[in-house]
Image (spheres, grey):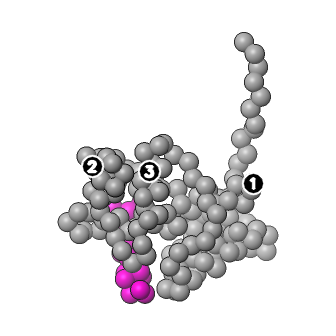
Amino acid sequence: MPLTFTEPLIEPRTYTITSSLGYIKAAISPDDTLTSLRVIDQPMTNSSRNMPLIIRNLKKQMDDYLSGRLKVFHVPVRYTGTPFQLKVWDALLNIPYGQTASYQSIATLINSPRACRAVGTAVSNNPIFLIIPCHRVIQKNGSIGGFAYGAHLKKILLNLEKNNP
């Protein structure tokens, strides 16, 4: 069997962003593309003086978003997942600021109308919190549903968008 060369896996660089929501862990690829954005309990050790431009820009945009001045993020992103997850996450990117969509409507939009629960699972596995706006997905009956970082944080984000049209 012939040997094949595969490139070594390069770990993303990670940084802590302090925001009004708490600590946010941002991971970027070697080409300075955002690959992950998650809420964390404790800050990681890294110096704010050495943060790359993408992280500084992301922090500014997050601050602007959380103060109601920014509606759409402009940060290069790359996310990986199953084909189904990618369809769901791409659909989430089309939910406008200040609006919501139901798990059912997302399932229908991606041509899987019976896959509401699978949509919920994909939404909960969203790798890029805020930028892929998983907080805008609610239950069909209008209740807020689940959220990877807790219902309280989801309510904060929904209210922020509602009160800053």
Q: Is residue 146 left or right of residue 78?
A: left
Nearest the viewer among 99 and 66 is 99
| Three-letter code, disc 3 | Lys
Above or below residue 72? Residue 44 is: above
| Percent x, y of residue 148 | 42, 60
Residue at position x 36%, y 51% from top? 110
Nearest the viewer among 13 and 95 is 95
For disc 1, the neighbor class at 10 Å (few under 14, some 14 to 19, many from 20) is few
Nearest the viewer among 96 and 118 is 96
Residue hosting label 3: 87
Q: Residue furthest right?
A: 50
**Cα distance in 3D space between marks 2 and 1:** 38 Å
Q: Is residue 65 left or right of residue 147?
A: right
Above or below residue 6? Residue 116 is: below
Query: In the rendered structure, which disc, 2 or 1, sits on the residue that comes first in sequence?
Result: 1
Q: Secondary structure at mark 1?
A: loop
What is the quadrant of the C terminus in the image? bottom left
Residue at position x 57%, y 62% from top? 37
Secondary structure mostly seen in the magenta stretch = helix
Q: Residue furthest left?
A: 141
Q: Secondary structure at mark 3?
A: helix
Q: Secondary structure at mark 2?
A: loop
Query: In the rendered structure, which disc, 3 or 1, sits on the residue that comes first in sequence?
Result: 1
Residue hosting label 1: 30
| Percent x, y of residue 124 | 41, 55
**Cα distance in 3D space between marks 2 and 3:** 13 Å
The magenta segment: 146-165
Specify the label residue 113 is tagged with: 2
| Three-letter code, disc 1 | Pro
Query: In the rendered structure, which disc, 2 or 3, sits on the residue that comes first in sequence?
Result: 3
Is 156 inside the magenta-drawn segment?
Answer: yes
What is the quadrant of the N terminus in the image? top right
